[in-house]
Amino acid sequence: MESLMQLMAVVPGVFSVLAELSGNIHVGLAATGAGIGVGLVGAKAAEAVGRNPGAQGQIMTIGIIFAALAEGLIFIAIFLGKAGG
């Protein structure tokens, strides 16, 4: 940690660059997490339908709801990014 602080003191523009980047990093991480979440929901829904084809309608409904909740993270992250900056 001490060496990191010495590096920050040597390079004067590092803090301004980090300040510019930090406003957008959380949006990218939220998009990545939402993409992974939607992929997992789709994979598990397909697996569930393969195991019980009779419940396809209920599984699809639940899958769509959970996929929408996962994608909602992106909108929350964008809103927080705009409100903070």
Image (cartoon, rainbow, N blue to C red):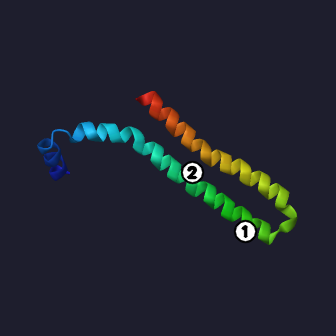
Q: Residues within 10 Å of mark 2 (few under 14, many from 20)?
A: many
Res. 39 mark? none
Q: Is residue 9 above or below residue 38?
A: above
Q: What is the three-letter code of the residue carrying label 1?
A: Glu
Q: Position of residue 41 (x, y in %)?
A: 66, 58
Instruction: Answer with left or right where residue 29 lies relative to residue 53.
Output: left
Disc 1 element: helix
Q: Are marks 2 and 1 in contact (CB under 8 Å)?
A: no
**Rendered-image quadrant of the C terminus:** top left
Q: Residue at x 88, y 65 (%)?
A: 54
Res. 47 mark? 1
Q: To which quarter of the image does residue 50 belong? A: bottom right
Q: Residue at x 34, y 41 (%)?
A: 21
Q: Position of residue 51 (x, y in %)?
A: 79, 71
**Earlier along the polypeptide chain: callout 2 or callout 1?**
2
Q: To which quarter of the image does residue 43 belong? A: bottom right
Q: Residues within 10 Å of mark 1 (few under 14, many from 20)?
A: few
Q: Position of residue 1 (x, y in %)?
A: 20, 51
Q: Is residue 7 above or below residue 46?
A: above
Instruction: Answer with left or right where residue 42 lies relative to residue 9.
Output: right
Disc 2 element: helix
Q: Residue at x 46, y 30 (%)?
A: 82
Q: Residue at x 78, y 56 (%)?
A: 60
Residue identified by numbered label 2: 34
Q: To which quarter of the image does residue 75 belong? A: top right
Q: Position of residue 65 (x, y in %)?
A: 72, 48
Residue at the far right: name it: 54
Q: Is residue 62 above or below residue 44?
A: above
Compute the Cα span from label 2 to label 1. 20 Å
Q: What is the three-letter code of the residue carrying label 2?
A: Ala
